[in-house]
């Protein structure tokens, strides 16, 4: 394995006019993530010493969307071809570096495909990734000699009829030493049908200099499929989701319909998982053994412990759900929610920064935010914690065994101690001690002989 530094160059300067969008093409998402970010993360997995991204159209938007990523930016003011784009980073490349060229609109290329290319790269080798297609229309053709060795790449518009019949095509992905790039790129010509400086022309230069062109291919053509329009974007999305569904099923999940589950992040699962239709996973999600998820749920950055049941139309974000808990239907758990084992959060209940103890229940039509609930608390329908005074948020603390009657308002900061009871319809503004009954509502008055108004 080579010890020379690895520099990855990602070409991301194109306008993407066929996307019909003000958003730069490389920022359009696959699986909930900009295409460019997929490529950057693949470069990171390869252990790149430095990642260079060449930007042009929408450069500031691309930079802003990638804020915080360890990337060196190079600007291609005029889009004069792939060879010209790579030339923009030549001053940043050490002579002894291995250079891998990737593309910001080819998002699903795998680390496993690229690693052998860069691991065996030396001064006498150029690594080239090709793919064989049933329909090679639009791609540069791989031209080989009578011994089967690659001698050049001919672009579609420059290819003869015989060359256009070739089905092995260029993916654009290649690996070569920086020293060779610095020698070859200044010699590129734009005397071609496009009037551009093609990076692919260095293949012929490599052959002329006696280098061996080492060819490899991806396991699946979708790995190297680029995106030029929204139709191609959707094709990649569906392929990605199909592969994720296959992974989940092999790892222990039953999917009601594998075509109607979307993974837009990293999902890890235990055994005997049940996932119904139209479920979306975003960010980092972990599902324990025996978790069941009903239809139309969205789960983001959450941990769901074993035996938990998430019923239909629930939204969970930034939350932790304990073992054997029951959520929904139509529940919303917002960030900071931590539910212990055996808890229940029912229909039309919303929680936020709520710590809920083992066995506690918030069954319906309630809001619990900035609150801490002990064990075996029962919160009646229509209960809210009034946690915001217009400037600051305040805490509601509820002890073990508390019963909160329906239609109660708990005005924070307030504490309800162990085994206390709150009468239905109360507005609680003062602390309630252990075992007390708190009733805070207007006195009922019944008026006899009252006549209901009638219309004139």
Image: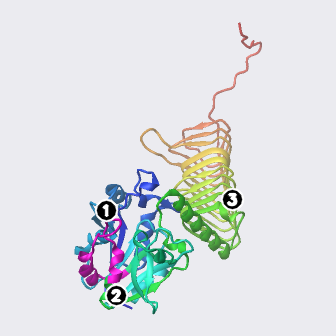
Q: CA distance from mark 2 to mark 1?
A: 27 Å
Q: Are marks 3 and 1 in contact (CB under 8 Å)?
A: no
* Residue 5 visible from this viewpoint: no
For marks 3 and 2, give the one nearer the viewer. 2
Task: Please provide percent x and percent y for residue 14.
Answer: 37, 61
Question: Is 85 on the left-hand or right-hand side of 391?
Answer: left
Closer to the camera, 123 or 190? 190
Q: Are marks 3 and 2 in contact (CB under 8 Å)?
A: no
Magenta residue span: 175-204
Closer to the camera, 230 or 30? 230
Q: Which residue is mark 1?
A: 79
Q: Is residue 219 above or below residue 157?
A: below
Local crowd size for mark 3, using a 10 Å CA cut-off: few (<14), some (14–19), many (≥20): some
How many marks do you count on the picture? 3
Q: Residue at x 70, y 58 (%)?
A: 294
Q: Which residue is mark 2?
A: 207
Q: Are marks 2 and 1 in contact (CB under 8 Å)?
A: no
Q: Residue at x 27, y 83 (%)?
A: 180
* Residue 212 visible from this viewpoint: yes
Question: Is 388 on the left-hand or right-hand side of 187?
Answer: right
First-in-chain label (2 vs 1): 1
Q: Which residue is mark 3?
A: 277
User: Does the segment drawn in magenta span residue 314?
Assistant: no
Badge 3 element: loop
Colour mapping used in the image: rainbow
Quarter assignment of residue 390: top left
Q: Residue at x 64, y 62 (%)?
A: 261
User: Does the segment drawn in magenta span residue 203?
Assistant: yes
Badge 1 element: loop
First-in-chain label (3 vs 2): 2
Q: CA distance from mark 3 to mark 1?
A: 44 Å
């Amino acid at each position: 394995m080579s010890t020379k530094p690895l520099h990855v160059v990602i070409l991301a300067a194109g306008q993407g006019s066929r996307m019909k969008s003000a958003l730069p093409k490389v920022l359009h998402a696959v699986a909930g993530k900009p295409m460019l970010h997929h490529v950057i993360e693949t470069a990171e997995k390869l252990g790149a010493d430095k990642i260079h991204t060449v930007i042009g159209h929408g450069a500031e938007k691309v930079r802003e969307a990638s804020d915080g990523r360890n990337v060196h930016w190079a600007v291609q003011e005029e889009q004069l071809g792939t060879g010209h784009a790579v030339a923009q980073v030549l001053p940043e490349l050490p002579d002894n570096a291995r250079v891998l060229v990737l593309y910001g609109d080819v998002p699903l290329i795998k680390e496993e495909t690229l690693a052998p290319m860069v691991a065996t790269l030396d001064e006498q080798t150029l690594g080239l990734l090709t793919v064989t297609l049933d329909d090679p229309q639009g791609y540069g053709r791989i031209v080989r000699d009578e011994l089967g060795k690659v001698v050049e790449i001919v672009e579609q518009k420059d290819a003869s009829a015989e060359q256009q019949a070739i089905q092995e095509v260029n993916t654009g992905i290649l690996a070569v030493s920086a020293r060779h790039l610095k020698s070859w790129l200044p010699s590129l010509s734009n005397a071609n049908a496009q009037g551009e400086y093609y990076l692919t022309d260095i293949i012929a230069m490599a052959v002329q200099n006696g280098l061996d062109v080492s060819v490899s291919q991806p396991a699946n053509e979708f790995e190297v499929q680029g995106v030029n329009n929204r139709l191609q974007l959707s094709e990649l999305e569906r392929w990605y989701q199909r592969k994720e569904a296959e992974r989940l099923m092999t790892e222990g999940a039953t999917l009601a319909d594998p075509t109607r589950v979307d993974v837009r992040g990293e999902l890890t699962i235990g055994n005997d998982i049940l996932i119904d239709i139209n479920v979306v996973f975003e960010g980092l999600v972990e599902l324990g053994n025996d978790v069941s998820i009903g239809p139309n749920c969205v789960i983001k950055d959450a941990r769901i412990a074993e035996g938990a049941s998430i019923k239909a139309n629930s939204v969970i974000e930034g939350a932790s759900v304990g073992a054997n808990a029951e959520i929904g239907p139509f529940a919303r758990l917002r960030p900071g929610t931590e539910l212990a084992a055996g808890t229940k959060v029912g229909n039309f209940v919303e929680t936020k920064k709520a710590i809920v103890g083992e066995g506690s229940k918030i069954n319906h039509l309630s809001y619990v935010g900035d609150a801490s609930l002990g064990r075996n608390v029962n919160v009646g329908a229509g209960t809210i914690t009034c946690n915001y005074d217009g400037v600051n948020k305040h805490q509601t603390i509820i002890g073990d065994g508390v019963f909160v009657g329906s239609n109660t308002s708990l005005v924070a900061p307030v504490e309800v101690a162990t085994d206390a009871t709150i009468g239905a319809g109360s507005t609680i503004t003062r602390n309630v001690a252990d075992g007390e009954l708190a009733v805070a509502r207007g006195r009922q008055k019944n008026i006899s002989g009252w006549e209901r108004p009638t219309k004139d």
